Image (tube, rainbow, N blue to C red):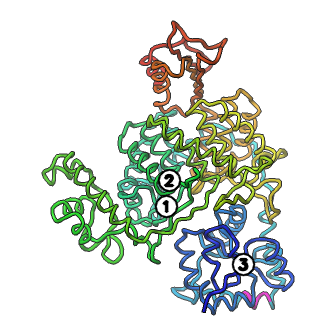
Amino acid sequence: MDKKPNKLINEKSPYLLQHAYNPVDWHPWGDEAFEKAKREDKPVFLSIGYSTCHWCHVMERESFEDQEVADVLNADFISIKVDREERPDVDGIYMSVCQAMTGQGGWPLTVVMTPDKKPFFVGTYFPKNRQMGRIGLLELLSGIHNAWQNKRDDIVKTGDDVVQMLQRPTVVSEDVNLSKDILDQAYSQLEQKFDGEYGGFGTAPKFPTPHNMLFLLRYWRHFGDKKALFMVEKTLTSMWQGGIYDHLGYGFARYSTDQKWLAPHFEKMLYDNALLCYSYLEAYQCTGNADFARVAEEVLTYVLRDMTDQEGGFYSAEDADSEGVEGKFYVFTRGQVLDILGEKEGTIFADCYNISPQGNFEHGTNILNLIGRTISEYAKKVNLSTAELEDILTRGREALYHVREERIHPYKDDKILTAWNALMITAFAKASRVLKNGKYAKVAQQCLEFIYAKLMRHDGRLLARYRTGEAAHLAYLDDYAFLLMALIETYETTFAQRYLDQAVKLAEDMKKLFWDAKQGGFYFSGVDGEELIARPKELYDGAIPSGNSVTTLALQKLADLTGNEKWGKMAERQLHFFADEAARYAAGYTYFMMALDYYIADKTKVVIVGSVNDADTQAMLQVVLNHFLPEALVNFYDSSKELQDEYKVVDGKATAYICKNFACQPPITDTEKLAHMLER
């Protein structure tokens, strides 16, 4: 018998469409569902997830595709499905409730609420029937239905209490000093959690959290703490050597299930790869470690090959599962490797990448990794030169990659999200400067053009999601904040005035839509957005940095680039408004710490004047762009086009002007002298 679709069939979200043929009578989030709940006097069963979420797939297979579960949900509840990546506003509110009520969170997120959206029960994954001490969904639904019928007053009170908690106003403390002390706290807390053996912070599971690395690089740069740099080098090296990195097709998985980065949760997210690429680029600037540049380039190769839409945007994610099995696409047995590569080279390859007969993953399969291994040391062990071994490994990776390509691929979520695309633009723009590759700047520019053409409404309102020709959902603070930073980064790469002009316009719009003029801080959703049970201001820098943290740094940069101090004053209000919250556990707000670091740092202003096509101008620009200068403001004036009263070329040569600590140096025309001045 053919399955009948439910109300999700007309949605664009890949996650919602995955559930469109469930026997559960799913509704998309909207007035129709809540009005039906009121009319039928039923509680709302809300399930939130995303298309590449492994445990979301498990719960669907066990429960939402099961007729018995569907019968209970359809009889006693109004069921709503939400894609957390399309509606981060809804997800953020109910996830905060889950964390407050249970002490933990994650996806799938399960919420039961009254028809007026007030939650009274929250949790995450539930099996169909009780197992290993975990209540089953059928038992849970029965208990909730009974309480709805017989203990309604208790339920309503719980919902009211939750809403009161969410709507409690933030108390701003004026006592927190915006000083290095808070940065020291963040550094000390990261140092205490640092894993000296395998890198990263804490134990299993281990998340990359790239902004921890970005903060530590700034802490090292400005305060000279060598251990801060060591922690970054150790972590980034351990990650690319581990199984969390795809050694054949490139790109990073979302997190490692173990302490040493061996066994990943195999899904690949665009935001992780954007932020990690940026981290590897900055680490390369600081260390000159060629492996870091290579990994950054490989990540961009993966994104361009597998995650780029023909119109210029970037897709969201790739699933962990293929053929219903997590990781199946990525793993090999030792026998397979020897069959593909031959006995001699296959043995060398397998031993180098820790591919054993018994396997290091499930069912005797192996995740390729270089944990505890350096290529040069292994080359000596097998009596080969490093170059000879590299040739064998390169041939082996290419051969295994081509075999892997013939397998059934994991599902790809092809929706295009403004916020995540902006993060990727930032990485491409940075890569163009650091890796001296103009192609990457063009990719960044093409994606910006895509966003302005496809995700900007006719009245200038930014939208959050694009898929199959449709843009939808009013953009959130993250979309505006990340796009603002992308525009600034692209301006710093190209020095094209249009990007700075667009950044100013975007900041003006962001202020109108999200800024709290009374207290300070930016709301997550716009003044024109749907009215939910709360309108939070988020600061915590989790897997993705918060919009408020990014905005606090971006507005300072915008103030310095434009000379308009109103943006700097807004950023300063941000710092004061959120400082008390951040100081409670500074290591949880490392992107915000980057904004504070920029605020207290001794700024350097560098101006290059010269004809853009002249070799001496390009050489001078490259010297500046090669250096890790997070506290610097760099401007370029093309002497062939722009007449400058303040900055002029000297003796017909490209000229650099440096101002630091409120003192300006004499103009410089020698690139070596410029490099020396920047290193001081």
Counting from the top left corner in percent of width and height, residue 321 is at 47, 72
Looking at the picture, tell me which residue is in the foreground, 528 or 92.
Answer: 528
Write the residue at 43% across / 46% down. Answer: 296
Real-space Cα distance between discs 2 and 3? 34 Å
Say the numbered circle drawn on residue 219: none
Which numbered disc, 1 or 2, marks the residue that appears first in the sequence? 1
Quadrant hosting residue 414? bottom right
Label ID, residue 7: 3
What is the spatial separation of the Cα atoms under label 1 and label 2, in whole angstroms? 8 Å
How far apart, in angstroms, are the residues tagged by discs 1 and 3? 29 Å
Direction from residue 528 to residue 330 in the image, left or right? left
Mark 1 or 3 closer to N-term? 3
The label number, if any, that marks residue 268 in the structure image: 1
Camera-nearest label, 1 or 3: 3
> What amino acid does circle 1 point to?
Lys
Foreground of the two, 200 or 566 = 566
Which residue is rendered at x = 75% and y = 49% of the image? 522
Mark 1 residue element: strand
Report x, y in % for residue 81.
Answer: 68, 74
The one nearer the camera, 519 or 455, is 455
Question: Identity of the amino acid at label 3?
Answer: Lys
Where does the image place residue 302, in percent across and percent down from the top left?
45, 54
> Is 147 contained in the magenta span?
yes
Callout 2: SS: helix
Q: Using the rendered image of the protein, determine whether residue 488 is visible from the camera's viewpoint.
A: yes
Q: Which residues are magenta?
A: 144-148
Q: Is residue 563 above or below residue 305?
A: above
Q: Which class describes the residues within 10 Å of circle 2: few (<14), some (14-19), or many (20+)?
A: many
Is residue 602 visible from the viewing direction of this image?
A: no
